[in-house]
Image (cartoon, rainbow, N blue to C red):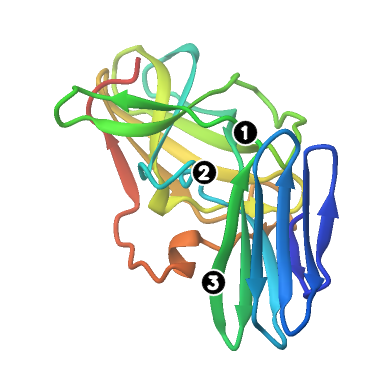
Amino acid sequence: MYGRFGYDYGYSDDSVTVGITPGKGFYCYSRTIAGGDSVQKRILSDAGRIIVNPVEPLNLPEEITNYLEIAFEPMIVEPFANKDVFLTFPVEIGIFVAAKKNIQVLDIFSLSPQKYSLYGPSSGGLITRWWHSEVFDAVPEVNHNILGIMQLTIENTTREWVELSRAVFEGYGMKIYYGGPVSMVARMKIMSPRLAETEFFDHSLVEGQKKALELYTARELHVVRRTCPMEWGMI
């Protein structure tokens, strides 16, 4: 599904059908999710390309939050540990149209369910896109159009055993790669039994992957912050 294509792009499987067809003086983009919604848009363009990338999973059903919360079964982390685990995250798929050095978001859709939660107190907490993942000790086999894989390095900098059952990430720091698994690489640094910080690294999970277009770059948003403090605990 993913990559860069001409205006003859088309993709179809049991879950979704996406494509571009020529019309009279324009091109027609259409997308239909099996048992779900459909979208049609006209493209007034003589020459360009279509970019299909996984994007930050924070856009549907609308832009509610910049934070992704991944919940998992509780883990007990020993003092000064530095361990890698693998989690899944929901994939959102962005369709972009590009011409004359300009990129426009055409469509964003997902084959994963959307659920939201609150991290922290009712006043001052964070609304998060919520996702539950199993914890794996190796890269699992998944459907790349539905699930991505996150390698998470858990670094306990304290002298204490720490229990955790969730991690919260800010979307602006996400670096997504595709080609094989859709993937991100991140770290969770534990500073105390109730305080941690997460951040993403700008490199692929496996060799040979391509970096996805960052949605905030396509929207010309200026981003400075790269880390996400977890101030309201990890369980």
Q: Amino acid at mark 3?
A: Gln
- Drawn side of residue 8 relative to residue 26, left or right: right
Q: Position of residue 205 (x, y in %)?
A: 65, 46
* Nearer-the-camera pick, 22 or 179: 22
Q: Amino acid at mark 1?
A: Ser
Residue 16 visible, this angle: yes
Residue 104's label in the rendered image is 3
In the picture shown, does residue 180 fall above or below 125?
A: below
Kindly report the distance in space between the C-alpha atoms of the residues bearing marks 1 and 3.
Answer: 23 Å
Quarter that holds the N terminus? bottom right
Residue 92 visible, this angle: no
Q: What residue appears at the point 67 percent right and 67 percent down from the top-left corner?
A: 51
Q: Amino acid at mark 2?
A: Pro
The residue beneath circle 2 is 57
Quarter-of-image position of residue 8 = bottom right
The residue beneath circle 1 is 112
Question: For numbered disc 1, what is the local secondary structure?
Answer: loop
